[in-house]
Amino acid sequence: MLFNSLEFLLFFPAVCLGYYVIPHRFRYLFLLACSYFFYMCWNPQYALLMLTSTAITYASGLLLARANAIREERRRLRARKWCVAVSFVSNLAILFFFKYFQFAADTVIRVLHMIQIEAQPPAFDVILPVGISFYTFQALSYTVDVYRGEIYAEKNFLKYALFVSFFPQLVAGPIERSKNLLIQINERHRFDFARVRDGLLLMLYGFFQKVVLAEYLGMAVDGIYNTYAERTGFQLLVATVLFAFQIYCDFGSYSNIAIGAARVMGFRLMENFNTPYFAVSVSDFWRRWHISLSTWFRDYLYIPLGGNRKGRVRKWFNLMVVFVTSGLWHGASWHFVFWGFLNGAYQVIGEWLRPLRREINRVFGVDESAFSHRLLRALLTFALIDISWIFFRASGGRDGVQILLRILGLAGTRWFTWGDNLAAMGLTRNTAELLAVSLLILFVVDLCRYRGLRLTEWIVRQGLWFRWLVYFAGIFGILIFGVYGPGYDASQFIYFQF
Amino acid sequence: MKKTIKWLAAIAVFLLVGVLLFGEISEVLRRKSGAESDMVHSFYEIEEDTLDVLFLGSSHLYYGVQPNVLWRDYGITSYDMGSSEQTAATSYFLLKEAFTRQKPKIVVLESYYLWYNGLYNSEARLRQAFDGMRFGKTKLEMIDTMLADQGLKTKLTYCLPFVKYHGRWESLEDYDFHTKPYLKGARIDYTVAVPEQPELPAASGIPEISLTWLGKIQELCEANGAKFAMLAVPYGVETDRERYDRRQGINVALEELLAEEGVPFFFCQKNEPDLIDPATDYRDKTHLNTAGAEKLTARLGAWLEELCPLPDHREDPAYAQWEEDLALYEADTAAQREHPESTADVI
């Protein structure tokens, strides 16, 4: 059940209604049933996988609590480590089997082929379970948090199962932490008009990002990327810039809808995107982009690897490990790995060159706090991130290189031709104008947020007519301009035959 | 408590305003069948229980019969419940809906599309017939019957045409904001084409499905106290002779069948072969233009009066709207006669 589906539009109000009508002590059971129903709409069998991950991490929590009671320190430490190890190995094994097995097998076969050994790929026909990367990471964070003593071991299995499967953020994040979400399950949430309104407004903005922006941007990008060999460098450049916004809107929309939906029911989920394209460095970008994943890697991989505590070289190595793993988390393919590698490399090189940059700034008397300097840094950061997106979007590493060469004018083809560039992107003049206005709205909303202006608060302070105007403009803007439903083809209605 | 009531009231008013706005926007975006004629939907503009005659049928009907002419010449109130490629099953549901608002004395079905062996021809044609219909029992019954093999989501798009047409914001036309209900479902087109009009062929078979639904239409008329009659608007050879013979042969077969059942049938090409002039009265090879429609309708009026006594409402002040509509129709036809404009691609 996608957020932008009719099913969700029926499901969500029904859940909210039920949630507020049912007595508090039964609410978690109701939400758990709803969350499993939500998940099983994709593939009922895979709910068993989620249940398995839930059971393993739940047991790890209880066993960790018991291990903590062992008096002998060595035995205690060993038992605690075993609990974490079993939880991680078994969960990651499931994730590997369903997400990476084919990729690993293909890679091995390719390597064998390079040394003249031919092997047949194993027959493996399994659909990737929806959201497996998200809930596995969320469940694993619980094991570590209990291990670190940052959260109690939850005794009620069903409450814990709800933490893993909480439907708003189950399939596309934010990847929650037990110390934030699990404790909220026991809270008594009353219907609060202002909170519900704020949640709905955030959902509305998320729907705008998804069904208007991401969908039209997707059309434009697909039109160019799917036939990149026939496209000019200019068209690919525009498509690549648009893809940066497409992926932001696509991913950001799911987070906003998730956070908004949870807020309607009284839950506070962590923020996931914070004006990422206003970042002034790649590391700043990663503090603003998919925050729940970045902080997961920071807390559960980077810091255990030693973080920045073991010297510069080790820090850089740790950074590269984190970003290559992040690439792999995004998709089982080498171009995702390269995308992650590139983002890690940017940061390592950036840090390596920092003394030189500072020296240049000192010599030329550059005011690092000046708007022009920050703007330049933001543009450069955007360019670097956007180059990495090429490898994220392209269907393979080679395609990514070809696209980059064409954008840079190094492919020996024409970089620009006069002609209908809009039509090449599958856009009409009207849809291009709509896209421009929508991108402007996105920019203004992000700018307000960057400047610390809370737009929702500002809107609700206005007079009734203005507030309602904004609400209805939002609702009907999405309903009219959004891309959904069976689609309308005017040519169907032309009277060709009698 | 006071605060809760305030919130509930605010939510209720917000929802009400939202629903009203949604209704208005849906209406603008809905694709109008027959462009400015807004067929089927404009039926609801007619005051309840004021129709004398209801016509049903495909493009042959809405190009061939002008309700304003029946009013002008006879004071008969009528409406063309037409839609492109209207099958007998489609006519049945449109008639059923019509009976919820009107009690016509005569129901006339145009026969051309009986040749079609199926419930409906295409999604677009089904939508042209039913998007304009208000949501209600008949529409649900139509969805249940005609779209039995379709999924729930597809069915929903017929209940809420907005889902299908929201993308029309890009291609809205002037007629989306200003429809012409005074055309009473007919179309005006004075372009001229000269078709070949051969001798009438031998009888050909009528598809079983058409006969089944024809029977249901007759039963429905009987149940609602309306006299049922049929009409065959003249047409020529569109593509090939074989096709013409097959389709026109249905009228020949129908004449015999209806005669047995005692159903009046105005088979123009047979009963009044000289009424329509192929040199001036067609807009293409198979449809009359408005000049031809005026001739045919004028003749139809006399035929209808023979079937059943129909009152002349022209002096009745309760029917003043019909006189105003006629004036608008006359102005439109005068303008069109001066500058004929083909309606071929805007159906």
Image (spheres, coloured by chain):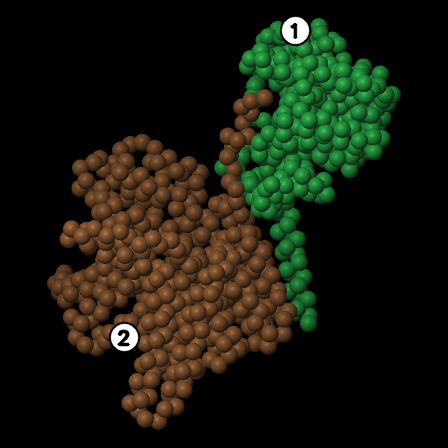
Chain colours: A brown, B green
Residue drawn 52% across and 65% down?
Answer: A35
For disc 2, the marked residue is A303
* Residue A444 marker: none
Pinpoint the chain carrying mark 1. B
Is residue B27 something that shows in the picture? no
- On the rendered structure, is B228 left or right of A240? right
Q: Secondary structure at mark 1?
A: loop
Picture residue at 33% right of the left edge, 41% below the top: A226
Question: Which residue is found at the position 52% from the left and 45% from the top?
Answer: A485
Is residue B261 shown to the viewer in this render? yes
Q: In the depicted view, which residue is nearer to us: A137 or B7?
A: A137
Relative height, residue B23 to residue B195 (above, below): below
Above/below status of B248 relative to A399: above
Q: What quarter of the picture does the C terminus of chain A occupy?
A: top right
Relative to the observer, which residue lies in front, B129 or B179? B129
Residue to which mark 1 is pinned? B199
